[in-house]
Image (tube, rainbow, N blue to C red):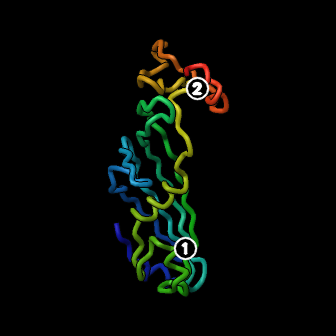
Amino acid sequence: MLYNLTDIFSSEGKEETLTTAYESEQVIIHSETYPICECSPLTLTLTNKAKGEVLLQGEISLVCEIPCGRCLKPVRVPLELKLEESLKESMIGTPEAADEMSFVAGYELDTDALVGNEILINWPMKVLCHEDCKGICTVCGKDLNEGDCGCDTFVPDPRMAVIKDIFNA
């Protein structure tokens, strides 16, 4: 959703609260797509702190489905996002603003881009279905949480490969 910031920038002491839905049904990170299973509405409070300066505060909760880092089973991961940004009218249209305020174009606040940035910042580094997940077999691909597959997983020391070749000759 796009929200016009002109009023809030020009009225000292003004405070506005808005509630809007996050419109995306998926998260794309490093060309991988993750579905959003649940999402609460985004609640934003915009407060004019001084002439040309607005404090943006908000929160949103969502649940994404991310594959386990070891066995690839889908895991529902809750994300509780707390947003806080200071917007300065003097920065609008400057090259620095393109990096720092990529969710503001002119005087338009893009709430979806704002939430997208926060999701990216708060994305978990590694997701596991449970702490002691055994993963999948590197030989046959069986889920080792369901039991042993019986594959030979012995990996010889590469430094001993020359000696092995002598005995195989």
Secondary element type, mark 2: helix
Identify the mark nearer the N-term, 2 or 1: 1
Answer left or right for 76 relative to 12.
Answer: left
Point out the image quarter for the N terminus.
bottom left
Tell us which disc is closer to us: 2 or 1. 2
**Can you give x and y, in whole percent of width and height, for residue 45 in the image?**
50, 65
Answer left or right for 75 relative to 155.
Answer: left
The kind of residue tagged 2 is Asp
Is residue 147 at least partly visible in the picture? Answer: no
The kind of residue tagged 1 is Glu
Residue shown at the point (47%, 78%) measured from the top left: 8
> Which residue has dot 2 on it?
165
**Can you give x and y, in whole percent of width and height, for residue 94 in the image?**
51, 86
The local crowd at label 2, few if under 14, some if 14 to 19, many if 20 or more residues have their Cα within 10 Å, is few
- Of residues 73 and 159, the one nearer the viewer is 159
Q: Which of the 4 image quadrants contains residue 167?
A: top right
Outermost residue, front direction? 169
Residue shown at the point (55%, 22%) measured from the top left: 169
**Can you give x and y, in whole percent of width and height, for residue 32 in the image?**
39, 49
**Can you give x and y, in whole percent of width and height, for residue 103 in the image?**
45, 70
> Which residue has dot 1 on it?
100
154 up-or-down from 15: above or below: above
Residue shown at the point (61%, 24%) measured from the top left: 166
The label on residue 18 is none
Secondary element type, mark 1: helix
Residue shown at the point (39%, 62%) measured from the top left: 112
| Distance from Cα at disc 2 to Cα at disc 1 | 59 Å
